[in-house]
Amino acid sequence: MNMKNTMIKNSIFLSGILLSILIISIIVINFFSNSSCAKFIFINKKNNSFSIENRNLPIQKHSLEYLNYVVDDFLLGAFSPDLKSPFAKNAKRNNLMLNNRDVYLDFSIATFNDCENILKGLNILNRTIRINKNIGTMFLSAEGKMYKYIGNYGSLADGIDSDSIFTENNIYIDN
């Protein structure tokens, strides 16, 4: 009986040591890691629902640099063959500016001309940015011209807030 108790105590002791090593390893890896996990929303090809794809992005000291990575990586499209992006492969971000918490995004015209469903694409982009960074209002432009209306959603002069959901598939650019 005494030997059995000794074996149980040794097993508990070894389990505790292994658990401690595991916890310390996780802390050290996270502390010295130079990347962070970002979440990207894409469309599931099978059922047309939304799915999240996790990616590691380089940690940036400044919010603007991190947002550049998020938007550019989003425009690259999904890595999983089961997911698709609402934007075409030639989608391009021209510029991204950050003023306090407001984000100003300028895209090439081709980004929106080739988008299979512009409103769904903008909703997904809006949500993807917001789950990765705490932003205020998002302002959109193409080739430097601000969007005035998207379908029945407008005026966009005040930007797109976190509650914005688009319902139409028409875009009008303010000349």
Image (cartoon, rainbow, N blue to C red):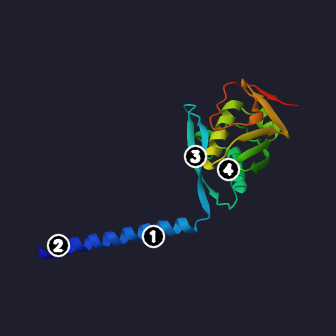
Up/down of 171 relative to 72, above or below: above
Alpha carbon separation for disc pair 2 and 3: 48 Å
Cα gap from disc 1 to disc 2, whole angstroms: 28 Å
Question: Where's the N terminus, which quadrant?
Answer: bottom left
Label 2 is placed on what type of residue? Asn
Q: Is residue 69 above or below residue 90?
A: below
Q: Earlier in the sequence, mark 1 or mark 3?
A: 1
Q: Earlier in the sequence, mark 1 or mark 2?
A: 2
Which is nearer the eye, 102 or 117? 102
Q: Residue at x 58, y 31 (%)?
A: 48
Q: Residues within 10 Å of mark 3 (few under 14, many from 20)?
A: some
Amino acid residing under circle 1: Ile
Q: Residues within 10 Å of mark 1 (few under 14, many from 20)?
A: few
Query: Which residue corresponds to mark 1?
Result: 24
Task: Say whether disc 4 or disc 2 marks the residue closer to the N-terminus.
Answer: 2
Q: Are marks 4 and 2 in contact (CB under 8 Å)?
A: no
Q: Is 5 on the left-hand or right-hand side of 77? A: left
Picture coordinates of residue 103, whole percent (x, y): 73, 45
Q: Which mark is residue 70?
A: 4
Residue positioned 21% across, 70% down in the render: 8
List the residue tagged with mark 2.
Answer: 5
Task: Tell me the quarter of the picture where residue 110 sits.
Answer: top right
Secondary structure category for the residue under label 3: strand
Label 4: state its secondary structure. Answer: helix
Residue 116 in sight in this render? no
Whole-percent x, y for residue 128 in the image: 63, 43
Q: Indicate the amino acid at tag 3.
A: Glu
Circle 3 is placed at which residue position?
53
